[in-house]
């Protein structure tokens, strides 16, 4: 793991390791000197969408209780780590190896026996992975990723899975959500403050 981490209490008695915000940029600046292809670690932050999705699942555990849960593009994986004890099994995935290493560190930190971190790129998705509930937090930010994501979502909806998407209200993400409209059964929007700015996060629940 390239980025320094610190133990943080997110809720009373719930402590996980997160990248040290003060050191992320400086660490990246050092890394890019030796590796000009290094990508900035956008995963290394507790994003507003992840926080709202976590709150939603804690308040509505029926979506994860005794179910196999897959979180894709998880980054730190706050939603999955928080609800893991409610689920039958939790698969927490990201395409970044450092993110997965941190996920595995937090699985150990929390003493979870039903969770695992998996290196997974949705552009080359492993369709042998099956889940009852799939969590997607702040994933519709790059139009070039929409097609593979939609393919994965449609495949899993067809198989009977529930898809829960948490997303900021971005203009570029509107076509992605509109294409899923026939399967959106429930939705709501909640505001949350991120870096002293109010951000509106929408939750969409999809199934056939």
Image (cartoon, rainbow, N blue to C red):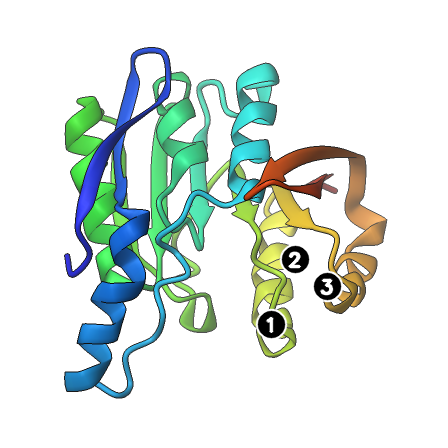
The mark nearer the N terminus, 3 or 2, is 2
Q: In the image shown, does 110 or 92 lie closer to the viewer?
A: 110
- In this figure, which residue is indicated by the disc labeled 3? 173
Mark 3 and mark 2 in contact? Answer it, CB < 8 Å: no
Is residue 21 toward the left or the right of residue 143 in the image?
Answer: left
In x, y percent, where is residue 87?
41, 23
Report the residue at 44% width, 60% height from top. Answer: 127
Q: CA distance from mark 3 to mark 2?
A: 17 Å
The image quadrant where one finds the N terminus is: bottom left
- In this figure, which residue is indicated by the disc labeled 1? 142
- In this figure, which residue is indicated by the disc labeled 2? 154
Is residue 19 toward the left or the right of residue 176 in the image?
Answer: left
Q: What numbered label is drawn on residue 129?
A: none
Q: CA distance from mark 2 to mark 1?
A: 18 Å
The mark nearer the N terminus, 3 or 1, is 1
Would you place residue 18 above or below residue 28 in this image?
above
In x, y percent, where is residue 48?
56, 42
Q: Nearer the viewer, mark 3 or mark 2?
A: 3
Q: In the image shown, does 116 or 141 lie closer to the viewer?
A: 141
The mark nearer the N terminus, 2 or 1, is 1
| Residue 206 visible within the image | no
- Count every numbered label the image shows and give the total: 3
Task: Count neighbours of disc 3 (C-alpha within 10 A) and say few if under 14, some if 14 to 19, many if 20 or more.
Answer: some
Image-quadrant location for residue 128: bottom left
Report the residue at 85% width, 50% height from top. Answer: 182
Would you place residue 134 above or below residue 118 in this image?
above
SS label for mark 2: helix
SS label for mark 3: helix
Report the residue at 23% width, 62% height from top. Answer: 97
Would you place residue 184 above or below residue 120 in this image?
above
In x, y percent, where is residue 77?
38, 41
Report the residue at 64% width, 70% height from top. Answer: 146
């Amino acid at each position: 793991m390239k980025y320094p981490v610190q133990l943080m209490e997110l809720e009373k008695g719930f402590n996980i390791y997160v990248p040290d915000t003060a050191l992320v940029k400086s660490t990246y600046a050092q890394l890019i000197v030796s590796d000009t292809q290094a990508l900035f670690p956008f995963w290394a932050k507790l994003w507003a969408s992840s926080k709202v999705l976590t709150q939603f699942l804690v308040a509505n555990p029926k979506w994860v209780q005794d179910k196999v849960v897959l979180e894709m593009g998880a980054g730190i994986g706050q939603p999955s780590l928080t609800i893991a004890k409610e689920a039958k099994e939790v698969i927490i995935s990201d395409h970044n190896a450092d993110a997965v290493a941190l996920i595995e560190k937090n699985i150990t930190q929390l003493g979870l026996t039903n969770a695992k971190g998996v290196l997974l790129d949705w552009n080359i998705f492993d369709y042998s992975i099956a889940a009852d509930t799939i969590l997607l937090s702040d994933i519709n930010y790059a139009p070039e990723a929409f097609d593979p994501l939609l393919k994965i979502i449609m495949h899993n909806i067809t198989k009977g899975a529930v898809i829960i998407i948490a997303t900021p209200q971005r203009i570029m993400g509107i076509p992605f959500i509109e294409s899923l409209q026939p399967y959106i059964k429930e939705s709501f929007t909640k505001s949350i403050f991120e870096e002293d700015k109010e951000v509106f996060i929408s939750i969409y629940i999809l199934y056939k």
